[in-house]
Amino acid sequence: MPDTFKPDTPEQVRDAIAWAVSEESPLEIVARATKRTIGRPMQTANTLDLSGLSGIGLYEAEELICQAGPGTPLAEIEAALTAQNQRLAFEPMDLGVLLGGGEGRQSIAGVFACNLAGPRRIKDGAARDHLLGFTAVTGRGEIVKSGGRVVKNVTGYDLSKLVCGSWGTLAALTDLTFKVLPMPETETTLLLHWLDELAAVTAMSAAMGSAHDVSSAAHLPEGIAAGGVSGVVTALRVEGFAPSVVARVAALTDELARFGAEITSLTGEASHALWRDLRDARPLAEPRERAVWKLSVAPMAGPQVVAAIRPLVAECAYFYDWAGGLVWLAVPPRGDAQADVVRGAVDAMGGHATLIRAAPEVRAAVDSFHPQPGPLAALSKRVKESFDPKGVLNPGRMTAGV
């Protein structure tokens, strides 16, 4: 019968992995297990549960750094930051509603291991850009440390960039140190109504290229609702000190008047609710049987990718997290989740497509992560072998046989 190991210390994590290496017995690595259904189903004999390594160990608000155990709930960290009027600027997405597990349950290790970032990414970067250092146990059963507790750290190899987005296939995180930033005083979202997609892309490009420091841009086609907003809507978010936001919003409104759209605005919680729903892909959560893709493409290429998919996939639904370089796409249930069509359209524009939600049998048959070209796949395999030569950490989750 499979066992679950739930260590309380990094040394116990090391011992569990060392045992797995000696027995050549694969481990599924989880913290709060909220993203367990992303990736290929794994045939692992045992589970290594890191939720016991939980809690904020260090928070120096004046230095803009925080350190926490891997199993620490993101909600706990965000509550502590909010009390000091600070935040995780990369706006980590919470896929709990989309995946059916409920919101507010994910761990800080899951956020960084999966490199989750939201619509503010173009302004503040991805999760990997905010991880200052970590301690982890590799698939060799060795404790390693990388980085430190200062924002400007240039010592050694930047392993933080490598661990982020590795989905637990390289090492089990036991401690994370990351930077935080002040929360803006206010935010306002401009809504341009009923622009067609070509005009919306042109408007978003103009806004993002303006001097008004727009932090996020998105476009919702007809039939997509988020944060209580529906209809065809192009959304632009401006954040900062209140007088600055008022001035920038007024200037941006004047500049966008040339598109001839009705322009309204959201402020405070209404604005926050809209971007939370877009961040978490909530408009595509129902119906639950649909497969959901996250398409990463150059923002200007998004409409072309959708135009290539729509004639071939009936009843697909989508929206653009434009400044995040994402198209979120839901397709009707089918054995292959329309993978050939979706990836063919994305490949033509030089992007990649990740299958975020699908039935287990679909994830077993279709690569959830975009197949890499030969040389890059060979490099990824060598990296995996250097960290985890026996293949005991989340084997096959990202690539079959690796």
Image (cartoon, rainbow, N blue to C red):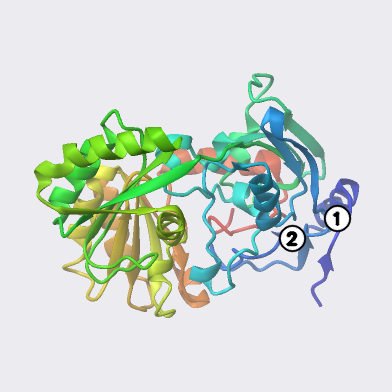
Q: Which residue in the protein does label 1 denote?
A: 16
Q: x, y percentage for residue 260?
A: 9, 49
Residue at (67%, 53%) from the top-left corner? 79
Q: Nearer the viewer, residue 187 or 376?
A: 187
Seen in the picture, residue 177 relative to 147 is either above or below; the reply is: below
The residue positioned 16% from the left and 60% from the top of the image is 194
Q: Is residue 181 visible to the viewer in this orientation of the structure?
A: yes
Q: Residue at x 65, y 64 (%)?
A: 105
When asked about the image quadrant of residue 110, the answer is bottom right
Q: Viewed as shown, does residue 243 lie left or right of 100?
A: left
Residue 149 in the image, given as x and y percentages of width and height? 73, 28
Measuring from the top left, give residue 258's x and y in whole percent: 10, 42
C-beta proximity under 8 Å, tags 1 and 2 = yes
Which residue is drawn at the image coordinates 48% and 76% (left, top)?
359
- Amino acid identity at mark 2: Leu
Q: Label 2 belongs to which residue?
A: 27
Q: Residues within 10 Å of mark 2 (few under 14, many from 20)?
A: many
Q: Is residue 109 visible?
A: no
Residue 64 in the image: x percent, y percent? 66, 32
In the image, 290 versus 230, the foreground residue is: 230
